[in-house]
Structure formats: structure tokens, C-alpha cells
Image (cartoon, rainbow, N blue to C red):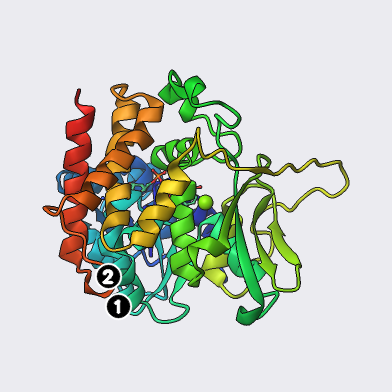
Amino acid sequence: MILGSTGSIGTQAIDVIRRNPDRFRVVGLAAGGSRVDVLAAQVLDLRPEVVAVAKGSVAEDLQLALYAAAQKRGYSSGEYRLPRLLAGPGTIAEAAAWPCDIVLNGIEGAAGLASTLAALDAGRTLALANKESLIIGGPLVKQRAKPGQIIAVDSEHSALAQCMRAGTRGELRRLVVTASGGPFRGRSRAELQDVTPEQALAHPTWSMGPLITVNSATLVNKGLEVIEAHLLYDVPFESIEVMVHPQSAIHSMVEFTDGSTIAQVSPPDMRLPIAMALAWPDRVPDAAPGVDWTRAHTWEFFPLDNEAFPAVLLAREVGAAGGTAPAVYNGANEECVAAFLRGTLAFPAIVDTVARVVSEHTNDSGSPAPAGGGLTLADVLAADEWARTRARELTSG
Ligand code: NAD
Ligand code: MG
């Protein structure tokens, strides 16, 4: 089951699946509904049992697009049988619980939470690209997941899982999460003031959806990934390091207690961690091209500039606070990114505003912040909504 099938992760997963028909079969597809033509073509290619779109208003468009795509491929009328079509916001979680072995959650942003919970509750293996759902759900997601039920798709976390195979849990000293540094690496805070959405959307090493691309430029993505690593692998925040590595060849590393560090290396290509997650613990041959070891390479490493890019430190704070704090960080950020892309918010103001919303949440007794075990889905959704509203207020001028 591929959720977010029309996005960057979804289309790359489909590429992996189509090249390995003996291993994988697509049971269902789900997407937001803004690209019905792409979705219709995927349905004709993959012949899933079920297709879901979050936007209820596009149900008819999708049906028409399917008939049009069928006709284009030479099916005579009546020859093409539609899959089961589901439309509306609640239907994505319904698709997530559909009978299948693996649910790949490639939905963008906090909207992926309901599907993550539904897939876990239905007992599916969850190949998780949608880090936001784990981060905002925190203990809520963790409590529902059986050991090994969540497999990370994020390249850093896939790398960490691969590196962790090299030693025992007791031998693990530290995780080193690498960051490309994004398109503005090396700039001072003042030099970030006037950067445009176009510049922020031009990532140096990865081609991804707009939200995660801007998050990579602000380093919010790395902040989210530190929390993700903490939640996935139960490693304390002080044992998770972030290192800037502009070439994105080393996707992360694990240091063991004897002083040895194991790294996972491959050219930046998400098809590798996607294939790894779908086949875990096996490897899919030729999932992506390997490193060309016949030519010269230069790999650099820099410590993070926390002054120009305060997003990771802030993420460590909200991650350690737990409760609804990560949902506030994420929800405020998603709104601020939207404002930045609309041209109504300056680039450094994204994280500044997130920090302000987070601090108001911490200090304001009016907003819910239950710690740890008492967290409910209603708390998370309320915190997400509160943070979005507050961020919109602060960014509307
Ligand atoms: P994207 O914007 O390219 O695609 C998002 C997909 O989600 C689309 O298919 C869209 O239709 C769907 N969608 C949006 N809102 C939805 C909703 N309410 N219900 C159902 N579907 C909805 O994003 P992406 O780059 O593919 O990223 C997806 C997730 O994977 C994000 O959580 C991102 O952080 C994570 N991720 C992406 C990459 C990457 O290389 N693209 C790498 C690591 C992690
Ligand atoms: Mg990543």
C-alpha cells in the first residue's frame, strides 16, 4: 500500500516496485488529490485493488481520468474495470488499514498521522517516510508499534539501522546524523535575510517535495530527524550528534564503544533506503547505483552552525520536553513554510516564529502539554491546530 503515491517518495517507491515484480505487488494507492492524472496513470500501470484520494471533490475527476487513461491505452469501453475508489479525508487511513503486508507512508507533513496509527493498529509493517507522524505522535505512535513494526525510509535512519547491524546494543556509543547543510550552508544569519523561495527550493543534493526541501534549507528537517532517531532507536538526545557533510555520500554513522565508527555510503538516491525498507532486512539488488570507486572523491565534514541555523537546538529542546511540544514545533513550522513560500515571511523568520510559538506553548498554561504517557491523539491534534493558528497570527503581519 503506497500512501502519497504521486509525491517524490511515492513515485520513487513505484520505480523500485516496477523493477522488482517478482518481489513486490502494489495493493493500493493513496494521494492528496492534486495530481489525478499522475494517479490515474499509476493505477493503469499497477492495477491496485483500491485507490484513495484525500480531497473528496476530485472523486469524479479521478474516475474520468481513469477512463481517459484506459482509453488512451487502447481499452475498449466496458473492458476496463475500475478499482475500488475511496474519496475524502478519512479514506486515507482506511487505505492504510487495507489488507496488505507493508504500508509505505509517503504523505507530506502532519496529515500522515492518522494513516501511521491506522497501519500500526491493523498490524501492517510500516515503511515510514512520513517522519512527522512519528515525531508529533511520539509515545502515542511508539506504544502502538510492536518491535520492528516501523522501518525507517528516511535516508539517515535507514543508514543508522544498517550501521547498527555492526555491533550490539550495549556496544553503541553514539549516533552521528549527517546533514547536507542545504543550499545556504556557510551563510551567516544576516546573509539569510533575503533568500527567496526559489533559492530555498533548489536543494544541492536531493530532489524532494517542497516542504522537506525548505525544511532542509532551514535545518528544521535535521531537527525533526534528531527527534526521529531518538524515537526510533531509543538513544538519548545527548548521544545523537549532527554533522554537516555537503556531499551527502555518508548518510549517517554509528560510533561504538571501542572507538570504531561505521558509516553507510551511497550516492544520494532515495530508491536505496526505500528498497531497504520494503525488503528489510534484505537488500534489493540494483536498487540504486553505487559509488564509483574508480574516480576521486572529496568528502567534507563540518560542525553545525547553530547561530545561523538554530532549528536543531530548538528541536532537541522540544524533543526532550516531549508531550505536545514536538507537535507544536512541527505544526508551527508547516504554517511558516507555507507563509515563506507565499512570499509573506522572511527565511530566518521561519525558525524564529517556530521558536516563539514553542515558547508560548511551554509558558502558556492555556495550551495543553501533558508529558509522556498521558498524551492522547486529541492532545496532539489540538496542539497542532493551536500552533498553526498561532503561527498564522504571527505571520499575517
Ligand atoms: P511530496 O510533496 O513530493 O509528496 C507528498 C505526497 O503526499 C503526494 O502524493 C500528495 O498527494 C500526498 N498528500 C499530501 N497531503 C495528503 C493528505 N492529506 N492525505 C493523503 N495524501 C496526501 O513529499 P515527499 O518529498 O515525497 O515527502 C513525503 C514524506 O517523506 C515527508 O514526510 C518527507 O519528510 C519524507 N521524506 C522525503 C524524502 C524525499 O526524498 N522526498 C526523504 C526523506 C523523507
Ligand atoms: Mg532525511
SS for tag 2?
helix
* 10 Å crowding of disc 1: few (<14), some (14-19), many (20+): few
Question: Residue at the location (33% across, 74% down)?
Answer: 120
Give the residue furthest to the right: 294
Circles 2 and 1, Cβ within 8 Å, touching? The answer is yes
Corner quadrant of residue 296: top right
* 10 Å crowding of disc 2: few (<14), some (14-19), many (20+): many
Question: Residue at the location (81% across, 48% down)?
Answer: 292
* Residue under pointer 2: 118
How far apart are labels 2 and 1 at the CA level?
6 Å
Question: Residue at the location (22% across, 45% down)?
Answer: 360
Disc 1 marks a residue whose amino acid type is Ala
* Residue under pointer 1: 122
Q: Position of residue 271 (x, y in %)?
A: 58, 54
Q: Position of residue 85 (x, y in %)?
A: 22, 58
Give the residue furthest to the left: 366
* Residue 84's disc number: none
SS for tag 1?
loop
Q: Position of residue 20 (x, y in %)?
A: 58, 64
Question: Residue at the location (52% across, 67% down)?
Answer: 278
One can see residue 85 in this view: no
How many marks on residues?
A: 2
Residue 226 lies left or right of residue 378; in this view the side is right
Residue toward you, 193 or 64: 193
In this picture, is 347 found above or below 85? above
Residue toward you, 151 or 35: 151
Corner quadrant of residue 391: top left
Disc 2 marks a residue whose amino acid type is Ala
Corner quadrant of residue 193: top left
